[in-house]
Every structure is written in C-alpha cells, then in structure tokens.
Amino acid sequence: MATSTTRALPAADPGPSVRQLANPARRAWQAGWNVLWTGVTGLATLWIVLIVAVILGTIVLGGWRTLTWEFLSANPESGMTEGGIFPAIFGTVFLVVLMILAVLPVGVLAAVYLHEYARASSPITRAVRFAVNNLAGVPSIVFGLFGLGFFIQFVGRGIDGALGQGLIFGQPAILWAALTLALLNLPVVIVATEEALRAVPGSAREGSLALGATRWQTVWHVVLPQALPGVLTGAILSVSRGAGEVAPILFTGAAYYLPYLPTSGDWVART
C-alpha cells in the first residue's frame, strides 16, 4: 500500500520593502524638508498669536481705567464724545438676533432639500449650487447696495404706499439691515449644514426607512439631530461674520449718532 507525504513549501521571500528600496539621501532630504515647513508654519502661528496678544494687551492697558459699568450702560452724549455706548451694543445684538432668525431656517431648509431631496444630476440643482457658491464670493458692499435698492426702495416704499402713512419703512432700518446680512450669510449656513448632513452615515437613513419611517421623519428625527453640531457651527460663523460686517449696514441700517433707544411703536422700522 503506497503512502504519500505532503511537504510544506518554504514561504516566499517578500524581498526588500519600498522604504528599503528608497534612496537614503532622498529620505533624509524629505525629512529635513518636513522639519523646515513644520518650523515655518509654527513660527507663523506664533507670530499671529503674538500680534493678537499685543493688540489685546494694548487695548486692556490703555482702556481698563475707562471701562466702567456707566460706560457700557449709558447713552452717548455731546456727539459721541462723552457718555456710554449702550445703544451701539443693543443695536448690534438685536441686529444679529434678527439676522439669525431670518437666515437659519431658510439656510437649513435649503441645505436639507439640496442634500436629501434634490437629484444631484438635475440642472436646477446644479444651478442652485452654482448660485450659492457664487453668492459666497460677492463683496459685502454689493449686498449693501442690493439691500438699499430692494428692501428699502422697492419693498419699504411699496409698504408705505400701500399703508398710506408717510415714510416709515422706506428708509434705512434695522429690519432691512438684518435681512441684508441674512442674504450675506446664507451661503455660509447652507454649506455648513450640507457638510454636516454629508457626515451622517447612510446606514442611519437606511435603518430608519427600513423601520417604516417616511423621508421627512427620517430627516427630522434621525439626520438633523446628528447634524446639529454642524448646523450650530454654521450659525456661529454667520453670527461672527454678521457682527463684523460694516458695508451692508452703512446703506441699510446704520445710525452714526443715536443718543437714546427708540421707544415708539415703529422702533423696528426706524434706527
């Protein structure tokens, strides 16, 4: 009776690795180049931090003696040469709140539609995305001129003509400034929300739909809660940009000297 034996073949030699085949001189040059750029970027970051520290230090050292509660809570006097800055603080806060109330719902709904409902290959979807991307690059002064022509001259004067009560809405107002800043920050909210929605895994949507939920229930109860941090990031970015923009409100809602807060019933329409 014949028997056969199986002999294990020796393992194949993998040979030298790519790192071993690389030129040592080239690897040393690449390592030195990485160290150089790491040092350059580190020095640039340190320089920026030092500049910010110097600016803040100069402000604190030069102004801490005059920064009092009366300065923050009082109204300006003598053509803004005396008194406080409370109307400016109130106007900025109220302007930002109105802007957020106007831009956040529209931006989030637009991002949800573009990412969850619209077909990516649709010409309308591509046109909307193209318009959003171009809108993000428009200078802020253009938004100010648009707000002056559309909100004040067209919408405001139209409301005044319909009401027949004189010039109320057809003039620079904090409401028109907030809507202009909302248009300015709309691309920021849309892009940030879309990135947050894109980060939600598709398995979460598939699991919700498999359990019998509708598309809207899936978006509202599953997708948006997971994308909430990204949505809040877009809101924070829009707040920081809206509070720092000057050109739009110069045409639509700026007041150089406001010694008191409006107290009449049309305080929203007047600045």
Image (spheres, rainbow, N blue to C red):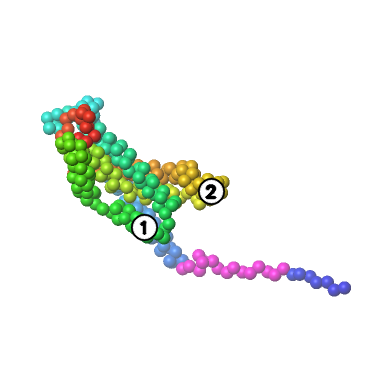
Q: For the residues marked 2 and 1, what is the alpha-carbon distance in whole angstroms?
A: 27 Å
Q: Position of residue 141 (x, y in %)?
A: 21, 49
Q: Residue at x 29, y 53 (%)?
A: 135
Magenta-tinted stretch: 8-23
Name the residue type under label 1: Ile
Q: Quadrant of the C terminus?
A: top left
Q: Which residue is label 2 attached to?
A: 209
| Lower sequence index among marks 2 and 1 | 1
Q: Which residue is label 1 attached to?
A: 124
Q: Is residue 139 left or right of residue 126?
A: left
- Say if the magenta span includes residue 245: no
Q: Position of residue 236 (x, y in %)?
A: 35, 42
Q: Secondary structure at mark 1?
A: helix
In this rendering, does residue 152 appear at all?
no
Crowdedness near tag 2: few (<14), some (14–19) or many (≥20) residues, C-alpha within 10 Å: some
Q: Position of residue 5 (x, y in %)?
A: 79, 70
Q: Looking at the image, which is closer to me, 163 or 209?
A: 163
Q: Quadrant of the N terminus?
A: bottom right
Q: Main secondary structure of the magenta part?
A: loop
Q: How many marks?
A: 2
Where is residue 126, by image quadrant? bottom left
Q: Is residue 209 left or right of residue 119?
A: right
